Amino acid sequence: MPNTPESDMIDVREGVVEPPEAFLSVRDLHVHFPTGDGLVKSVDGLSFDVHRGKVLGIVGESGSGKSVTSQAIMGLHKGSRARVSGEIWLEGRELNGYSEEQMRSLRGQEMAMIFQDPLSSLHPFYTVGKQISEAYRVHNDVSKRAARRRAVEVLGMVGIPSPDRRYDDYPHQFSGGMRQRAMIAMALVNNPTLLIADEPTTALDVTVQAQILELLKNLQREFDSAIILITHDLGVVAETCDDVVVMYGGQCVEKGAVTDIFYRPDMPYTWGLLGSMPRLDRTRQARLQPIAGTPPSLINVPSGCVFNPRCRFKDRVEGDLCVTEHPDLIEQSPGHSARCHIDPATRRTIWTEEIAPSL
Amino acid sequence: MTQTPDLTKRSTPAQENHTPPADGDALLSVRDIRKHFPIKGGWLGRQVGAVKAVDGVSFDVHARQTLGLVGESGCGKSTAGRVITKLLEPTSGSIVFQGRELANLSRSHMRPLRSDIQIIFQDPYSSLNPRHTIGTIVGAPYRIQGTRTEHGIKAEVQKILERVGLNPEHYNRYPHEFSGGQRQRIGIARALALRPKLIVCDEPVSALDVSIQAQVVNLLEDIQAEFGLGYIFIAHDLSVVRHISDRVAVMYLGKIMEIADRDQLYSAPMHPYTHALMSAVPVPDPDKEQARQRILLTGDLPSPINPPSGCVFHTRCPLYREVLDDAQKELCHSVEPQLTEHAPGHLVHCHYPIVRQDIASAQDAGIDTGAAPVEGAVVGIDGAGGNAAGGNAAGGVAGAGGQAGAVDN
């Protein structure tokens, strides 16, 4: 049974698959890792779209599969033991079937990635500028001098003071925030249309985080690129994203516009996330409301709803449906879907009467 | 040193329920501690400079209360925590714990006191020895202090494991068998083993996922109430600090920029650095995020080897850059401000503190903000020069206007 209208579109035409309209479209993505202990289902049936000029936020806790998803889009699992199935469409091209060679021509050119830890993602042995101009020369047949000019230009664009001088610095001579800027410069040097930022600000202080997020937003406005922002911080999502995918145990449990997720969340896990974080913008609660238990094992994924062992609202469903049957991702209002067995009307009542007032 | 002013004392009647025990004596009084790490250079290996990691920090902690230390990386908050627990020797200053001076105690004299002051570390992965079982890790404090028999230790450890929400039957398991949140519980159990009076929590929840973070924060609050603990809660997350602390100190480049009771600080922050920090925290509400005005700090943290002259924050201060005139700027970069009381219990390390309620967080119910100074008004310009001119080595705890006197000794 199709989960979403989008997947309908593919299923009805056997064999001939129509490229989706969206700029980037991920369809029923599975990433499984065979290990000695069993098959780790890091991503298990994930679908989403990203449009140009928009930021998609992927939220989830450690082990929810958000980073593995981004690596799959970048084709970084190719050549590893990971089993990747499903479709990844970028501007009408299906990338999952691409060879490593074909991916390499896209990577850095049309799609680029910003990693969480800038210190370990920059090579300590080469100057920052050299690493950036190399990324440029791989895709552009230009002289070293032209590449240097371009690298200095992007370093200046991301707000590094006196970029011409800093070009010859090594990564250790940069502060944390500047290293992250250098990473962003490297990702932007070829004007990619898709930018994946995997926890780009997690290692940074709040004041630096504010600078980097501001920078990302400005750059996007300028180049009309599509951004996937992977984070565990709902505050960052509220600040930067247009659409949100909430992941739990390798699956998308809720997706929608950013206002849907924050003002009309429709899934107990999303409620739990909102309730467990202390917030500066609200009256201080006497007590935080954590989600009981721990995230699921990805080898022995719980039967039925993946969130059921931690769900406070299991008793709102007749019988043991939550434990026996895996709920589908069902669209409740345009663009807003959730994976939950609880009756939609009951869910709305729980949110407005029990959850929202206690936040 | 018993006459030191009571920095943790509550000021507003609405907070009566949080007031410290009747005796009023602080559990821990830290006065003007400094930690300078020497830089050796030249060919004789002489000291050529120092990293001023902590440079004159003073505060009090009471039983059953939490002092939050916030600041960005490199501000010296963790070093301060390590100096207090004497994992690092202070360069100067005084640390009085229950009336006893710790600053110059030797290791062997310090050891019996270690059962009273414990620490929980940030990284639950590297702070537990992977070769030891949970029983050994949590039982180690007893063995080191030589408090109980072997049989007694196991029973006691299992009791504590149960208290922190772990299965006592996991006594013989190794750290790698536990998740991050569970490991942090093991760290808490170890800190709790000897029934300490003060626990320094150094970023205890920063490495955890939000849903797990809330579990650990609640656990810390529960055991504080149950055992009457005093906490020093070191974190960079302003919202977690607001949740758990009674009093909060904001640090920058080894100094306290602002210290006040929690509600006072969050509803009427006065230091430009606190304003910038608070405005930078993203809130989980898209509409508010759209409407918010961010105060972006420019540049990077200056080096603690050569901190800026005058006010250490002036190189990045938005007020200095955009509002002050040249005469006022002169004061900022030539004279170091002292921590001065601008509202009851609210001390600010700034020549031109202003209250910014526009960026303050949501007010707690029942807190009267009417008494707070008018928005945007520059207060405390008069006297700032005087304070600074009279600045002595013991600065940092400039006395309170009406109720408490200046520090005498």
Image (spheres, coloured by chain):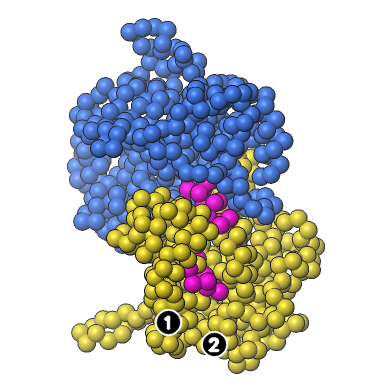
Chain colours: A blue, B yellow
- Among the 4 quarters of the image, the one containing residue A190: top left
Estimate the x, y position of residue B146 in percent, counting from the top left.
41, 78
The numbered dot on residue B50 is none
**Discs 1 and 2 lie in a common subunit:** yes
Point out the stretch of residues depicted in magenta.
B193-219
Chain letter of the residue beneath label 1 in the structure image: B
> Is residue B203 a member of the stretch shown in magenta?
yes
Q: Residue at x 31, y 32 (%)?
A: A39
| Residue located beneath label 1 in the image | B111
User: Element under label 2?
Assistant: strand
Q: Residue at x 35, y 19 (%)?
A: A92
> Is residue A78 a member of the stretch shown in magenta?
no
Q: Relative to residue B52, is residue B69 depicted above or below?
A: above
User: From the viewer's perspective, is the residue at label 1 or at label 2 nearer?
Assistant: 1
Estimate the x, y position of residue B226 in percent, counting from the top left.
61, 65
Q: Relative to residue B16, is residue B113 depicted above or below?
A: below
Look at the image and tell me in which quarter the C terminus of chain B lies: bottom right
Estimate the x, y position of residue A251 in percent, counting from the top left.
44, 30
